[in-house]
Amino acid sequence: ENEISGGVMKNILSLFDGIAGARQALKELNIDCKYYASEVDKFAIQVSKANHPDIEQIGDVKEVKKYSNIDLLIGGSPCQDLSIANKERKGLQGERSGLFYEYLRILNEVKPKYFILENVASMSKESKEIITKELFDIEPVMINSALLTAQNRKRLYWVGKLVDGEYKKV
């Protein structure tokens, strides 16, 4: 918290940004930052631009190139292929949920001070294990959105901090 409130969080890169919920959270915490957002849904982009005109839209996650000096990488790749709600789920081999590997590519290229990855808690044990292994064996924390919203949705959060060149669980 001291690093966040003390002004260390200056550059944020949000992948699969949606309507910029993370930007809103940072704003409510009075964290002034440069916020880069990767999103492809034109309606989500319209909402985020209307609410946060300072956001720099950077396009499709597959086109994101290396950024430097990123303090926090945020993302939650599409869950359609992971969710138990999809009877034919393909896991991380699915076209949409497989975009997790783009998050991973960017994480490894950018090497931010911190990262947060979010996804559905109803994913298969195998998918959870793969993501955990790829994210430096950092185990996720499960949080139900009902703690903060009217939605009852369990989500997994992998949170890491770069310490001496390696990511450790926060």
Image: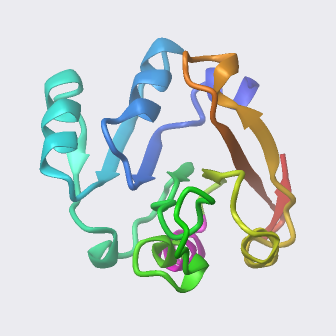
Residue 17 position within the rendered picture, expressed as x and y whole percent measured from the top left: 37, 47
**Residue 147 is drawn in which quadrant?**
top right
Q: Pick the quarter of the image with the C terminus.
A: top right
Residue 92 position within the rendered picture, expressed as x and y whole percent measured from the top left: 58, 79
Residue 110 magenta-drawn? yes
130 shown above or below 48: below
The main secondary structure of the magenta stretch is helix
Asked whether, in this view, residue 52 is left or right of residue 126, the answer is: left
Q: Which residues are magenta?
A: 101-111
Residue at position x 22%, y 46% in the image: 56
**Which residue lies most toward the bottom here?**
93
154 shown above or below 82: above
Scheme of colours in the image? rainbow
Can residue 117 be seen here? Answer: no
- Relative depth, front residue between 120 and 166: 120
Residue 30 position within the rendered picture, expressed as x and y whole percent measured from the top left: 48, 14
**Which residue lies most toward the front here?**
87
